[in-house]
Image: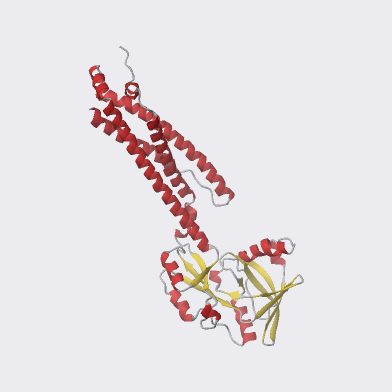
Amino acid sequence: MRRVSVAKILFQGKSKSKLVLTGIGMLISMLIISSVFQIYSDFGSLLNENKKEGAFEYIQISKEIGVSTALGLSSSKFSKKEVDRIKSQLFVEDVGELWSNDFRVYGKFAGNAFDMFFTSIEDDFIDADLDDFTWREGQQEIPVIISNQFLTILNHAVLPSQGQRPIPKVAIKQASVDLTLSKKGKWLKHRARVVGFSDRITSVLVPKNFLDYANEALSGSVVQDVSMVVLKVSDASSKELRSFLRANDYEVEGELPLLDNAKLLLKVALGVLFAFGIIILGVSVSLNLAQFQLLVLENKERIKMLVLLGYSPKSIIHSILKTGFLNMGVTVLLVLLSVLLLFNRVHGVMVDAKLGYPELHLVTFLIPLVIAGVIMFGVKRKLKKLVC
């Protein structure tokens, strides 16, 4: 006598919609979990770049200008005591002091006149080529390093509003600005030339020995107070650092805090998405086991009849599992194809944005396979208890 399919007998007359919905739930959950792992791996260098050994971040801070500062009741400068206090914090590796000019800087370039300002900091804190960033007394030309943010504002806001074309960095380095430095009837004539650009410091940097020379020549003394400071830290997003800055009303310059917040938001979003995937997976697995249990309970009489006809409990379980493996295989295949499509999309975005070249990890493929294996193992154990 030809043996018939046990699974067909047991599933006969049963609604397939519940199984389909359960399969969709497992598909979505596996896809979310695998995708989160792959995306986190893709952006791992961006999320954890400050964790590498020997790598530091630099943030520029200044005092918040409040009513008391405007009324002259408090100073916007950092005293030596305040700088030493910042240096003593455990989360601060080093502090770079930014000194500023104590005189007026008047510049003239291409028929346009404008006021400027100068600052100076230790060379170790400057993220630009310092080969030409030197000055000695008697030298007319002053080497200057400007912020890339200033250049962006110039090329994308100032010059277009005046109907002028943007200026490339190469051209800016070739240009020379005539300077008049003055205070209380004293004045100095110099020329300034841009020799580099900084992403770290939003200011106009000149060599420290020139700033000291000009301050002493025009003001009669070398400026000791510090206008801003640059902190060298291992983790700019640490809670201790942020609490310290808030408690002392220090303002942070530049884009680093925004980048850190973006990193934090991305980590939180991926974490929430991963947790959501786990929840969906848990619900889907529970429903899957419950449906197989209900299938056996509703077909108790049929199973007894099959046993009387010569079918062993083991063969009945094997037939049910075969159907389950087939459905699970289709689900896993769809997950892997979806992950491949997602990877190609993310890879293209990262390459276009010059964020690196992501690699497709083997673990990404193993995750749905392992989940499917665990689920089917649980189903097998459940069926053994119910059928045998």
* Residue 62 at x, y percent in the picture: 52, 73
Q: Is residue 249 above or below residue 284?
A: below
> Which quadrant does the C terminus fall into?
top left
Residue found at the far right of this picture? 111
Residue 366 is at least partly visible in this image:
no
Nearer to the camera, 233 or 291: 291
* Residue 317 at x, y percent in the picture: 29, 26
Left or right: where does residue 63 sit relative to residue 273? right
* Residue 69 at x, y percent in the picture: 53, 79
Nearer to the camera, 284 or 174: 284
User: Residue 208 appears in which quarter of the rendering?
Assistant: bottom right
Residue 13 is at least partly visible in this image:
yes
Residue found at the far top of this picture? 1
**Which colour assignment does the render follow?**
secondary structure
Question: Which residue corresponds to the image point at 54% horizontal and 52% vertical from the top-left?
Answer: 355
Nearer to the camera, 208 or 105: 105
Q: Is residue 70 above or below residue 366?
A: below
Question: Which residue corresponds to the image point at 38% horizontal and 35% vertical from the top-left?
Answer: 22
User: Residue 147 appears in which quarter of the rendering?
Assistant: bottom right
* Residue 193 at x, y percent in the picture: 68, 71
Left or right: where does residue 344 sit relative to residue 3? right
> Which quadrant does the N terminus fall into?
top left
Q: How many marks?
A: 0
Q: Is residue 319 above or below residue 33?
A: above
